[in-house]
Image: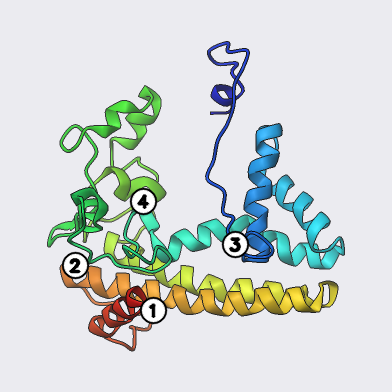
Amino acid sequence: MAKVVDGTLEKHSISGIAGVANIGSDRNWTGHPVGQANWYAYGRLAWDHTLSSAAIAEEWTKMTLTREPQALASILPVLNQSRDVYVRYTTPLGLHHIMGQSIHYGPEPWLEKSARPDWTSVYYHKADAEGLGFDRTARGSNALSLYAPGARQVWSNPATCPPDYLLWFHHVGWGQQLSTGRTLWDELTTRYYTGADSVLWMQRQWEQARPALDAELHADVAARLRIQHREALWWRDACVLYFQTYAKRPIPPTLTPPTRPLAEVKELVDLYQLR
């Protein structure tokens, strides 16, 4: 990708890169103070695509938040793992496009009607009594044929496809054992639960850095992390309870079942979309 952007792959003397910025009308442009790191990272990669995400995170944190070593040790893991945490409690195992139609930060995996079929959630997750996932192999949409031969060979087989991409390329049976040692259902629910729990870890990491940070900024982000945990539980409950209607399997015994029914979660989504 970097060679495409800098022009060296096809020997272009002039090249460019464009992206969608996460800025708005907030006084600090991105609303969330730490959300500025994403915009900064985009700009840095546009100038030097050899930089690692970890290096950019450290660079931004030292210039924006603190240079105190112990605080850095608490903050940097959060920046470097926050994307994976978010994916685990929203769209694990290669699921995608199951957010609310008008609340993209919230879940709506049951969305069946929209202006176009490919704007719905059910179009993408293909949940049924047999399993879950979009078949993009030659047996399905054959979108996998667009990928490079090496990747196509690995991803075409559910047994060798990395778990993070599995449901992007395959429709997998609920009871199918994955490379993780769990069945699809058990792995799906485990990821939703551990993803939501990881937001609590993010809160603890941020609290450890408090002495080295501006008090107002620390309080701002801490409040946002509390909101994030509430929304992570919202995603977890919505998706686990919804997909359970197809899987017909119990929550793994190591996990605590949601305390609210699916109907209540759906009402919450409806309420937010009416606001």
Instruction: Report the mark closest to the observer, 1 or 2.
Output: 2
Residue farthest front in this picture: 25
Above-or-below relation of 57 to 74:
above
Q: Quadrant of residue 47?
A: top right
Residue drawn at x 39%, y 25% as measured from the top left: 150
Above-or-below relation of 192 to 46:
below
Mark 1 — residue? 254
As helix, strand or loop, the secondary structure at mark 1 comes to loop
Q: Earlier in the sequence, mark 3 or mark 4?
A: 3
The answer to whether marks 1 and 2 mark residues whose Cβ atoms lie closer than 8 Å is no
In the image, residue 247 lies at what x, y percent?
Answer: 19, 67
Mark 4 neighbour class, 10 Å CA radius: few under 14, some 14 to 19, many 20 or more: some
As helix, strand or loop, the secondary structure at mark 3 comes to loop
Using the numbered discs, state the Cα–Cα distance from disc 1 to disc 4 in whole angstroms: 23 Å
Mark 3 — residue? 25
Whether residue 235 sits left or right of residue 266 in the image: it is right
Whether residue 215 sits left or right of residue 259 in the image: it is right
As helix, strand or loop, the secondary structure at mark 2 comes to helix
Mark 2 — residue? 247
Camera-side residue: 112 or 62?
112
Camera-side residue: 61 or 220?
220
Q: Earlier in the sequence, mark 1 or mark 2?
A: 2
Identify the amino acid type marked 4: Gly
Using the numbered discs, state the Cα–Cα distance from disc 3 to disc 4 in whole angstroms: 32 Å
Q: Is residue 259 visible?
A: yes
Q: Quadrant of residue 254?
A: bottom left
Mark 4 — residue? 94
